[in-house]
């Protein structure tokens, strides 16, 4: 990619100060329609940063072979869950997409081949949190998928190629959960903030310390970090969006945590802001 290509990224967007990067612990889909401290945290995060020109979201719920990016003008609202009230299925988030940003994102990731997708839309890992941050649905949103065939280091390194977008007012969001074990949910404490099994408490403490100390090596190599992390991350889908956020951090940038609570025994809502 040459200098002219970089200068042409999203020509509709002016150069801006470098946008922060977020990882959002999205938790239950019910957060989309409930009023609680976590959705208040999402709103507060949005209020504390410049209004973005567009959003690129890497969601735990778009796990694909290869990498894809949504490239439609109007992404549909995907209700990719079951067993919840009809009120939740009725929610729509009719924000526009941005095919040009999708194209430029794909070009930035070269030589990785990125497929421009016209079928997916916005899954609940994206819209259930972004709707609280920008309720007017007036900011274009595209999603980038997570290639499940690749190891953690690959995702951390791939994220670095997206840094140029931050200078165009693009807010990059990773959406998942650091501690996410649905098989071990404590149903008696499904809505109890602060409820965590001993292993979840240990995993949260370890990962928080690594995040704040800048020890990203241990976070990338989470499979080597003992039993608590094995329970916390039984599958990589909800964890890998964190690596996209961390891969974008520059040495001079601050990292802070918010919504830092366990819930339901085996989930953490811990969210991260960089910049």
Image: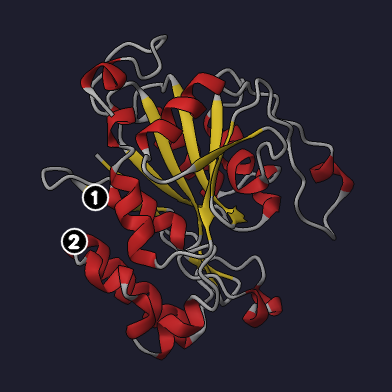
Q: CA gap, disc 2 to disc 1?
A: 8 Å
Q: On residue 8, which mark appears?
A: none
**Measuring 27% from the left and 15% from the top, which residue is drawn there?**
15
SS at mark 1? strand
Quadrant of res 253: top left
- Residue corresponding to mark 1: 255
Residue 174, image x, y percentages? 45, 48
Residue 92, image x, y percentages? 76, 31
Q: Is residue 46 visible?
A: no
**Measuring 51% from the left and 57% from the top, which residue is drawn there?**
147
Label located before the other in sequence (2 or 1)? 2
18 left or right of 182? left
Q: Residues within 10 Å of mark 1 (few under 14, many from 20)?
A: some
* Quadrant of the image containing the C terminus: top left
Q: Are marks 2 and 1 in contact (CB under 8 Å)?
A: yes
**Measuring 77% from the left and 46% from the top, which residue is drawn there?**
79
SS at mark 2? loop
Residue 239, image x, y percentages? 46, 64
- Residue corresponding to mark 2: 214
């Amino acid at each position: 990619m040459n200098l002219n290509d970089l200068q042409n990224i999203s020509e509709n967007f002016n150069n801006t100060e470098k946008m922060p990067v977020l990882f959002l612990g999205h938790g239950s889909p019910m957060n989309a329609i409930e009023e609680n401290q976590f959705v208040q945290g999402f709103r507060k995060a949005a209020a504390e940063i410049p209004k973005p020109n567009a959003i690129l979201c890497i969601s735990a719920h778009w796990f694909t072979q290869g990498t894809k990016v949504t490239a439609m003008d109007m992404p549909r609202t995907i209700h990719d869950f079951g067993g919840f009230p009809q009120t939740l299925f009725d929610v729509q988030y009719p924000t526009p997409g941005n095919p040009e940003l999708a194209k430029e994102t794909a070009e930035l990731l070269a030589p990785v081949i990125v497929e421009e997708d016209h079928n997916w839309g916005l899954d609940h890992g994206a819209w259930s949190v972004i709707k609280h941050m920008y309720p007017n649905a007036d900011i274009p949103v595209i999603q980038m998928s997570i290639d499940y065939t690749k190891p953690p280091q690959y995702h951390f390194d791939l994220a670095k190629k997206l840094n140029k977008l931050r200078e165009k007012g693009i807010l990059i969001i990773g959406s998942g959960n650091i501690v996410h074990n649905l098989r071990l949910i404590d149903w008696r404490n499904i809505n109890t903030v602060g409820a965590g099994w001993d292993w979840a408490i240990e995993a949260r403490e370890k990962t928080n310390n690594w995040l704040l100390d800048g020890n990203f090596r241990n976070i990338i190599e989470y499979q080597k970090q003992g039993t608590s992390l094995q329970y916390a991350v039984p599958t990589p889908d909800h964890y890998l969006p964190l690596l996209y956020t961390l891969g974008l951090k520059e040495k001079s940038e601050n990292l802070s945590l918010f919504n830092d609570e366990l819930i339901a025994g085996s989930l953490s809502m811990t969210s991260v802001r960089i910049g």
